[in-house]
Amino acid sequence: MGDLVRRRRLLDAARSALLERPDADLPDVPRHVVASWRRSAARGVDPGVIANQYHPDLDVQSRLVRCARPVVERLAEQVADIPVCIALTDDRARLLVRRDTTSRIGRDADVHNFAERFGYAEDAVGTNGVGTVLESGDSVHIVGAEHFVERLHDYACAGAPVHDPFSGRIEGVIDISCRAEHSSPVLHSLVRSAAARIRDHLLRDRDPDQQALFDLYTRVDARTRRAVLAVGRRTVLANAEMRTLLEPGDLVALQDHARFLMIGGPGVDDRIDLPSGARVRLRGSTVSVGGTVAGLAGEVAVLREAGGLPAPRAAGDDRAAIAAGSVRSPALRAARAVVAEALRTGVPVLVVGEPGSGRRRLLADLDRALRSPDGTAGTAGPAATAGPADTTGTPGGGSAPLVVLHDIDRLDDDGARRALALLDRPGARFAATATTATTAAATTTAPTAPTAPTAAATTPTAATTTAAAVATAAATAAATATAAAAAAPTTATTAAATAATAATATGAGAAPRGPSHDALLARFRQSVTVPPLRSRLGDLPALVGELLAELAPGRDVRPSPDALRTLARYDWPGNVRELRAALEAALGRRPVGELTAADLPEFCQSAPRTALRPVDQAERDAIVAALRDSGGNRVAAAAALGLARSTLYRKIAQYRISG
C-alpha cells in the first residue's frame, strides 16, 4: 500500500507539471501515459470530471458482440475471484457489453458512467484502458493516477485492441477494470489473449467458401509486395496496392473477368485489356471447397498504362464548372447540392468539416457558378468604402453578395454577439463554416502545410475592409469583408472568424458557449458536412489536376499514374491543404513535365497508424530517401543507412512505407 501511495504522489506531481508546462520532461512516467496526458490536455479534458456521453442508438447486438460474448464469459470465469468489470467497446470507445464479477464493482462502474452505451473515448475521459488503446493502436495497462481524470485514480484498467482478421483495422477494445489495489500485470496478458480469441471468432464467423478464399488471399499477400486481388461469388478482397492500382471502372471489369476465369481450372495466368485502355496481368490460382470453386486469388501487374489518368486543367472562371462535373463522392455531391440550393434561395447555411477539407472553397466556387448562366462568374462592381458596421459593398451582377463567417465554433460569446450584428445587415446572403474535431486531424504526421485555397486566398481582390473586431488575444477572431473583382471575379464577401490560438491547429476544444453563440447558430436553417479527403479519394485525380492548374498556371504539369497511386495510398489527415503542400513540394523538384512518385514528399509514401514524433518523422523520411536512391533495393538502402536488414524491414512495416 505504501508503494501505491508513493507512486500516486509522484504521478500527481508529474501531471500537475505537465498541465502547467505541456513540454515538461517526465522521465518517471511511462511514455505512452505521457503521450496520452498531452493529448488529453490538448483536447481540453477536465481532470476533475467525467464528461462522457450516452449513445441510445448504439447497436449492442452486433456481429462483434456475438463473436466476443463467449470470450467475455470465459474471461469472467478466469477472474471470478477478483472484483472486476469486463467490457467490450466498439471502435469509437462506446461500451457494447459489460460483465461484472461482483455487484460492488458494478455499482462503482455505474457511478463513473462506465456502462453500456456510454462512451469512454480519450478526448472525453482522458487516459484510460479503452480510449487510449484506440489512440495508440496498442494494448495498455493504466494503473491508479496514470489516469488523467482524478475520479479514476482509485482504479486500474487493462485494454487490448480487437482487430478485424481481413482488414486489420481495429473493430473494438476488450478491457478489464478493477480497483488499483487488485491490479496485476496478469490482467494485461489476459486481455491480449482475449482479443486474439475474439479475432479468431470473427475469422470463423463466415461460410467455408469465404474462409477458404481468405486463407488463399493471406498466403498470396504474405509472399509478395505487389497488388493482390481475391474474388469469390460474393466476396472481394484487395490489399492497399490493389485498391489504388486501377480506376474504379477497370477494377470492376477485372473482378468480373476473374469470376469468369474461376471456372477455367486451378491455375490462372491471363493478360486482360481493361475499359480505360490499360492492360494488366493476373496470375494466381483458384481454391475449391467440396468440389466447388470458392474463388480465385492472385497478383496483378500493370503491363500498359491507360495513357495516364487525365489531370483536368482548369483556369479562372472555368474552375467551378469543372469541379462540379468531376466530383465522384456521393457525400460531396449531396453537400454541393444542398449548399447550391441554399445560396440560390438565400437560406443561411452552415458548412461543417475538418480543417483544410475545402469548406470555404466550396462556398466560393458555388457562389461563382450561380452568378452566371454558364457557370462562370459575372463581373463584380467596385466595393464601397465601409465602416466597421458596414460589411458589404455594391454587388455586381444584380444579386446579393455572399457573407461567409469562418469557423464560428471558435468564437467566444462576445465574438458571436458581434457576428450576429453582421447577419442583421440587409441586402446580403449569409453562410458560415465550422470545424469538426477528429483524430485524424489532430494527429497529422506530415509537415505543416500552407493555408488551403479559399475565396479570399485564391481570388485577387479589389478592396478589403475591416468589418468588425470579432476577436481578441488567444480565443477571438477578426471579421474581414472582401469584395472580389479581377481576373477571376466573385462577389463573395468573407468574414473570417478564425480563432488565433494554437487550439485551432491542435484540434483542441472550441471557445466557451453562451447565449449569443446559441443565437448565432439559430440563424442558420441548414447544415452540410464536407467529407474529408480520405473519404473521397475517387475525386483525387481531378482535384490534383485542379490544384496543379492553380499552382503552375500555363505550365505542362501532370501527375504520372504511379504518383497518383502513391497519393491515393496516403490518409491525408491535413486534407486538401496538405495535398496542396505536397504538390507544391513536388513542383519544387520538377517544375514542368510529368510528376513521378519520387518527386512527392517523403511523408506521402508512409501511412502510419498513429501520430509520429518529430524524430520518427525524420527516421521515416531518411528511410524513404534511401529506398529512392537505391531504386527500391532494400539491401543497398540498409547498407546506406547503417542498419541491419531485419531492422530496415521492421521499420518499413512500422511506418507502412509503400513502393
Image (cartoon, grey):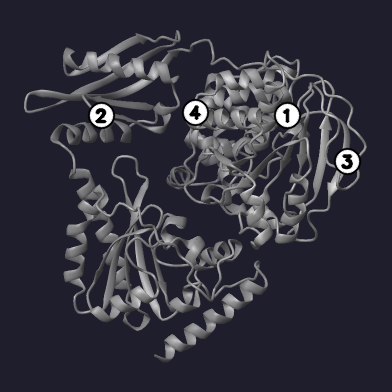
116 above or below 155?
above
Disc 3 element:
strand
Q: Residue 329 carries which label?
A: 4
Q: Name the residue under label 2.
A: 235
- Front: mark 3 or 2: 3
Could you tell which of marks 1 and 4 lies nearer the N-terminus?
A: 4
Q: Residue farthest to the left? A: 290
Q: Which of marks 3 and 1 is in front?
A: 3
- Residue lying farthest right? 385
- Residue at point 75% right, 54% down? 500
| Front position among marks 4 and 3 | 3
Mark 2 vs 4, N-terminal side: 2
Q: Is residue 318 left or right of residue 542?
A: right
Looking at the image, residue 97 lies above or below residue 337: below
Q: Find residue 182 and report its image quarter.
A: bottom left
Q: Mark on residue 588?
A: 1
- Work out whether residue 2 or residue 546 is closer to the camera in this orientation and state it: 546
Residue under label 3, please give it.
Answer: 465
The image shows a total of numbered marks equal to: 4
Residue at 72% of width from left, 53% of height from top? 499
- Secondary element type, mark 1: helix
Relative to 561, 487 lies left or right: right
Mark 3 to mark 2 CA distance (whole Å) = 59 Å
Q: Of label 2 and label 1, which has the lower sequence position?
A: 2
